Image (spheres, rainbow, N blue to C red):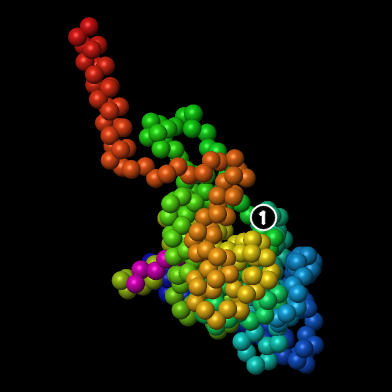
Amino acid sequence: MALQDSAYRLGLQVRTSLVRDQVDSALNRYPPGEAPRVIVIGDEAPVAAALAEGLFATLPAPSGAGPEMRLVIVERSAPARWPAGTITSFALLPTRPRADGCTVVHIATSKDSTLGRFEARYWRDAPFAGAAGPCWFLARFGVPGPQVRHWLDARYWDVAGGIPPIDRRLVHGESDLRDAGLFERLFGSVAAKFYGESVTLEGCAGRRPELCEASFLASPYPAGLLPDGVVGNNRFTSRMLFRNEGSPFAFYALSGSMLGVPRAASEALLAMMLDDLGPARFAEFWTSHAPVAEAFESVAGMSLGDWYRIQLRRQMVAAGIPEPREATFWPSALGILALAFGALLWRAGRRQVG
């Protein structure tokens, strides 16, 4: 595991740096401010490149308050298997002197239809594997406040992966409990109704909204995993949700874990904020100089956790699911089970006597 971890981290640095150098070289051929909106490097996969360019044109137009948003397509022949640490879509933030815009980078191959492996709705919510989101928010609202920017950088902008209006459902319809066991009939299978069967999302919708707030405000990824200015890819972040600081190497758990916030929930966070708060209040949060939790509460009038619980409960109502029951007091639950077990023993004793 340590060797795999080292190879993956080295691949992220080396291979992503090589692609970034190609992109920088292509951009430097143009005078500042005159680079076209779409640039294609290479001629290995013209069909895939044309499709990616067409999809880029369908993104909602930002307001133009921030740096211009562009797409650079790097054409490659399709390998049998991508080497460790390869990411095929990412965003280049305008952090270097010559950078006059925010660039979405997409590696297109002859076998890549961009939408072929994913449903259209998923691509629409998080285009180019979430790489377009950071550039879109920068173009729409400009540079974020220093505390918000620090939070985004520490998370590699994963919470900006979705572009509004967001249509991803994190809550699904009522589960069929006809074949469920006694315990499931008594207490329900609530977590199965949430994306990834996440008990964390279940807790957020119930009595523990602080679970999601703590997860969203944390910085769960190690520093230095990607070259400077490279952010925004949900395939990269899906591999790295948790760190074990006591281990000699970093251990990364899949984001689909029942005990974590699913990737689909993380990447949709800013888009959900914008959809619910509206552009004016979201811009106030985005440009605030206060810490993230304080900035959000001052704009929304409630904590991030309480706000997120409301969003989940709205989705529950839309899915036809009743609001979560109050948490069962375990002594009472054990008492119920004890009574049920006692009744079975009593009935068995009566049968024997009869």
Query: Residue at point 65% right, 74% down?
Result: 283
Report the side of 260 relative to 344 (left or right): right
Q: Is residue 131 visible?
A: no
Image position, residue 114 (x, y; %): 70, 62
Q: In terms of secondary structure, what is the magenta stretch mainly?
A: loop
What range is drawn magenta here?
240-245
Quadrant in which residue 86 is drawn: bottom right
Foreground of the two, 191 or 17: 191
Q: Which residue is mark 1?
A: 167
Image position, residue 133 (x, y; %): 65, 70
The stretch drawn in magenta includes residue 329: no
Query: Residue at point 49% right, 71% down?
Result: 293
Image position, residue 205 (x, y; %): 49, 51
In the picture, the quarter occupied by the C terminus is: top left
Kind of element beneath mark 1: loop
Q: Is residue 351 visible?
A: yes
Q: Is residue 164 above or below residue 72?
A: above
Foreground of the two, 11 or 157: 157
Image position, residue 84 (x, y; %): 51, 70
Foreground of the two, 262 or 230: 262
Report the side of 217 relative to 170 (left or right): left
Query: Residue at point 59% right, 44% down?
Result: 317
In the picture, the quarter occupied by the N terminus is: bottom left
